[in-house]
Image (tube, helix red, strand yellow):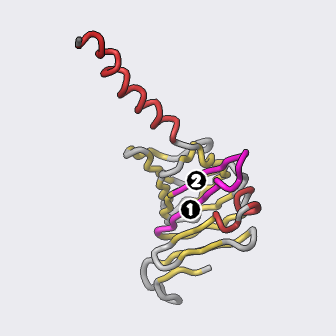
Amino acid sequence: MFKKYSFLVFSLPLFFMANSVFALELAGVVERIQGSAQIISNASQKALQAKSEIFQGDQITTASDAEILIRMTDGTVMAIRPSTNIIISEYRLDNKHSDNDNMLIMLVKGGFRTVTGAIGKKNPQKVRFNTPTATIGIRGTDFEVTVLDEKKQDAEAGTYN
């Protein structure tokens, strides 16, 4: 009897592993990088390079000398500033049903400038940027946001747009 069901027992884990691989949706690609930056993806950390792929769930950290330019698959462009930590919390681009589109970026610290792409143009309510002290929804196509995690000489800790 075990032989009869052994195929099922051994193939079921492969089915779930294959589905988890396909569940990762490409969110964007690093177009340019200056300085050093790291990406934490699937519990592994590696250095970012030009042409590195960014996926939903990835965390990106830039050093104090770094700036990177990411182009998302919907055409959104993000210029990530030095000493920044962001997480691509949610990202989905559905070319057939734009109601399924979604982008949520968490800015933990630092800053970035962005010009929105197709998701922001079709469904601006589906694009959000969270910080420790604010949630930002877009209404335009170009903005910059900075999170100061501690008081600086000229500014209190907080979110600045």
For the residue pair 39 and 96, the one nearer the viewer reads as 96
The residue drawn where x is 58% and y is 81% is 160
The disc, 1 or 2, on the residue closer to the chain's N-terminal end is 2
Give the amino acid at mark 2: Tyr
51 part of magenta stretch:
no
Mark 1–mark 2 CB contact (< 8 Å): yes
Give the secondary structure at mark 1.
strand
Give the amino acid at mark 1: Leu
For the residue pair 157 and 25, the one nearer the viewer reads as 25
In the visual, does 105 lie left or right of 126?
left
Which residue is under mark 1?
Answer: 104
97 part of magenta stretch:
yes
Task: Give how far apart the Cα atoms at labels 1 and 2 are.
Answer: 6 Å
User: x%, y% of residue 5?
Assistant: 30, 16
User: x%, y% of residue 147?
Assistant: 51, 75
Question: Could you say which disc has been placed on residue 91 in the image?
Answer: 2
Image quarter in which the C terminus is found? bottom right
For the residue pair 3 and 120, the one nearer the viewer reads as 3
The residue drawn where x is 51% and y is 53% is 36
User: x%, y% of residue 103?
Assistant: 60, 59
Q: Which residues are magenta?
A: 90-108
Task: Count residues near mark 1 (Cα–Cα under 10 Å), then give few for <14, some for 14-19, many for 20+.
Answer: many
The residue drawn where x is 51% and y is 67% is 107
User: x%, y% of residue 31?
Assistant: 66, 48
Q: Residue 148, relative to residue 13: is it above or below? A: below
